[in-house]
Image (spheres, rainbow, N blue to C red):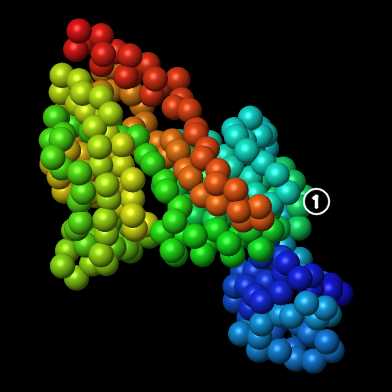
Amino acid sequence: MLTISEDESGQRVDNFLLAKLKGVPKSLIYRILRKGEVRVNKGRVKPEYKLQTGDMIRIPPIRVSEKEQAPISKKLNKVAQLEQQIIFEDEHLLVLNKPSGIAVHGGSGLNFGVIEALRTLRPEARFLELVHRLDRDTSGILLVAKKRSALRSLHEQLREKTIQKDYLALVRGHWQSHCKTIQAPLLKNELASGERIVKVSEQGKPSETKFSVEERYQNATLVKASPITGRTHQIRVHTQYAGHPIALDDKYGDKNFDQQMTALGLNRLFLHAFAIRFEHPKTGETLRLVAQLDDTMKNILKLLRENKA
């Protein structure tokens, strides 16, 4: 039996159960709701019922197989390293400098991600949810809400487009200074394997990214990309559309450019969410947080400067 707190109120009961019962298949969640095994204030409820402060919810005992739990325990070392990547934390939110190569959540054949890792590290945390997402190979700033009220506030800021996110990307060739904005609609296709491919298409959703040149090299440019909309793979597709794909982008990149960058020691997609500006969900204070580039990225830029000289 659980009592719904003010912070938990307003969410649908099916979403509440999905968050509480980690690893339990959706089909089982809806089955126990349909059979009336879940009770709110001693009565049956439909999945779309919105929980209210003070509601008493009964959750039946459900076992998750050990097979499903094993992958998390095997990766505890990798999980522990995430603690070193926290750049800001208070009682309302947590901000990570996410390493490249780690998914933000399990899915698409992956049963483990940043959010599952944080929940493993902090079993006492009542609430931990992603505010937004980053591609698996993209590194940098990732916001995690520690209260539902914080999640609601930050989602509202995202909808109102008052959160500013800035990325650094190393792209092929000389980016033209007059190319400051790309507005190109993006259409997402999902392959049978679950892989997502995005392309510029008139049938796509409106998408906009602001660009500025940070530094030029012989055959590459470091650009700052600030997405106005938040489409899947947006910066990666917009840079490709401009004729300047990002280094080591396995979906939208250029093989010859990638080989040149690999020869310098680059072993990952050069896209990094380096800065974010938003209003603190509780105090209203404007926060600007910065996540440093990793050593590999710093070294590549150093070598490119030396080559240019």
Residue that label 1 marks: 124
| Residue at 66% in and 76% down | 10
In front of the other: 214 or 22: 214
| Residue at 25% in and 37% down | 212
Q: Is residue 287 above or below residue 129?
A: above
Quarter holding residue 266? top left
Residue 184 percent across, percent down from the top left: 19, 58
Quarter holding residue 186? bottom left
Total numbered circles = 1
In front of the other: 80 or 208: 208
Q: Is residue 233 above or below residue 205?
A: above
Q: Secondary structure at mark 1?
A: loop
Q: Is residue 118 above or below residue 247?
A: below
Question: Which quadrant of the figure contains the C terminus?
Answer: top left
Is there any visible trace of residue 187 in the rendered image? no
| Residue at 45% in and 52% down | 163
Question: Which quadrant of the figure contains the N terminus?
Answer: bottom right
In front of the other: 135 or 25: 135
| Residue at 84% in and 72% down | 2
Quarter holding residue 42? bottom right
Dot 1 alpha-carbon crowd within 10 angstroms: few under 14, some 14 to 19, many 20 or more: few
Please give left or right for residue 139 compared with residue 229 in the image: right
In front of the other: 249 or 302: 302
Q: Residue furthest right?
A: 1
Q: Amino acid at mark 1?
A: Glu
Residue 71 percent across, percent down from the top left: 63, 46
Residue 129 percent across, percent down from the top left: 61, 57
Is there any visible trace of residue 127 in the rendered image? yes
Please give left or right for residue 244 compared with residue 92 in the image: left
